[in-house]
Image (cartoon, rainbow, N blue to C red):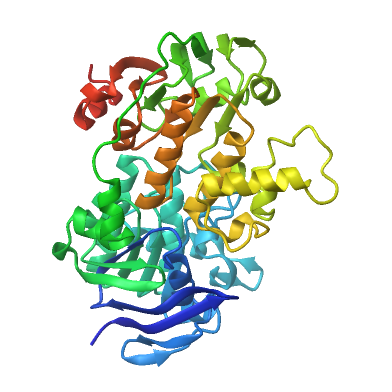
Amino acid sequence: MSHLSLSGITKSFGGVHALRGVEFQLSERGSVHGLIGANGSGKSTLLGVLSGQLSPDAGTITLHGERVEFRDPAHALSHGIAMVSQESALAPHLSVAENILLGRRLSRSWWGIDWTSTHRRATEVLARLDLDLDPAIAVSRLRPDQRQMVEIARALSIETSVLILDEPTSSLSDDQVRSLFAAVRLLKGQGVSTVFVSHRLPELFELSDEITVLRDGLTVATGPTGAFDQTTLVDAMVGQAATRRRSGPPGRRGPTPGAAPLIEVQKASSDRAFTDVSLTVQAGEIVGLAGLTGAGRGELLESLFGARPFTGQVSLNGTSVTRARPEEAIAAGAAYLPPDRKTDGVVLQRSIVDNLLMVSTRDRRRLGAPRTADTALAATLAKRMSIKAPDLRSPVGSLSGGNQQKVAIGKWLGAGKTVLLLDEPTRGVDIAAKQEIHALLRDAAAQGTALLVSSSETDELLELCDRILVMHAGVIVADVAAAEATEPSITRLAGGHL
């Protein structure tokens, strides 16, 4: 008998069928079940049903051999099902103990909170993850991976039997991912089952015991992890025909012959982030930035866009940029894609049209409906970006992660910017969306745009870029042609092994 079973789950939103009879099973206690699918496949909706955030239109959920119907997330929690979302739900200014035992789980006495007992209980929960964290420290002082562990610890504080991890590694370094995996394996030994959602195939193969693949709201493949390889998994996700159309390494056009550099940096430095950085990017060239977390990649892009103070000389499109003001960089033809689309890249509550026109209409008054010409531009952009949505008036927050990322990029491409500064351009998107975004970026380069791309995924840089600049401790330590580089060689350079 399965530990957890979802059978015939359907869910519609208006005329959109998000789930069309999904089947999903955790075979036994302590198993790690990988869940994967392209954007729009129904993953988020299925997680919403499993965690009690959504009620299915039809289908059954069976837990420990008994049929259950979750009224809300609290009801799912009472049955031992807890979810750690991709977006943090911590209170950063509260302590580790307060976040773990938030609400009624805090130890109380007649005079208020019993902090000694609260800290002791929090320490006991952290010990299950083999974590030695001070329960009194503020969460804002923790690293991203430590914050993730606090969220998992909070889930464990309610005697969780099924833990859902939704893209938990999207903002973690390699070392932090290893720590997370070690914690999941510890929980596995304690009988806690994990539903592990990731778009990174190597992670699924390393951690999971079973894998389920969704496509178009249906379960298209499921079974032991050993029954899959990368090819069969991608075929199941996007369809065999689609995989074959996209197979083979894409050609790199390289810089436009005889073109002047559109990005020129001479001896740029920013306090404690990077030092004496010099680089050039020509029209039509895609240059990557590789390096470990903290190497200065993101801070360098922020400085070039005027969002961070720096010293040195920076020229964009032949225009000298001397002040830390994004307005100056935008006026010089530069665009910046931040690593966190939900907080900095798009306005989730506004429509697709509003977001796509955000840059191109920034100098106009925006009272009233968009002009007819602007709406037509937004429709053209949406088609060019292959944004999948029932209506361009839909809020961006209703889109899948990959489509949100396309909107975040599209607003700049629609404004005709010729310098693109991209920080983690495919973070949190699936394989199909990543390929589509790469194609869009190559197309922009072919039209004469200069791209400087920072990514924590070395294989992405090797596939996308013409050259790769490797940063270590705030310094560029190597400039290598992507065609001559390998993932091990880039990793060694990023680690300071020259």
Residue at figure coordinates x 52%, y 54% from the top left: 88
**Eyeballing the image, is 251 above or below 102?**
above
Q: Is residue 116 above or below residue 280?
A: below
The answer to which quarter of the image holds residue 37 is bottom left
Residue at the outermost left position: 226
Residue at the far bottom in the pictured view: 66
Residue 137 seen from this side: no
Q: Residue 486: where, in percent of width, then height? A: 21, 28
Quarter of the image where the C terminus is located: top left
Percent position of residue 207, x then y: 24, 57
| Foreground pick, 159 / 298 | 298
Report the number of numbered marks: 0
- In-image side of 204 versus 60 (left or right): left
Which residue is painted at 29% across and 65% down in the image? 187
Foreground of the two, 404 or 46:
404
Does the image show residue 142?
Answer: yes
Which one is in front, 441 or 490?
A: 441
Q: Residue at x 68, y 36 (%)?
A: 359
User: Quadrant of the rendered structure where residue 127 is?
Assistant: bottom left
Is residue 104 shown above or below 442? Answer: below
Q: Quadrant of the N terminus?
A: bottom left
Q: Residue at x 38, y 26 (%)?
A: 288
Q: Where's residue 442, x and y in %?
A: 41, 32
Residue 448 position, x and y percent, is 49, 22
52 relative position to 223: left or right: right
Give the side of residue 297 with respect to residue 63, left or right. right
Q: On the rendered structure, is 234 left or right of 261?
A: left
Depicted 494 relative to depicted 67: above or below: above
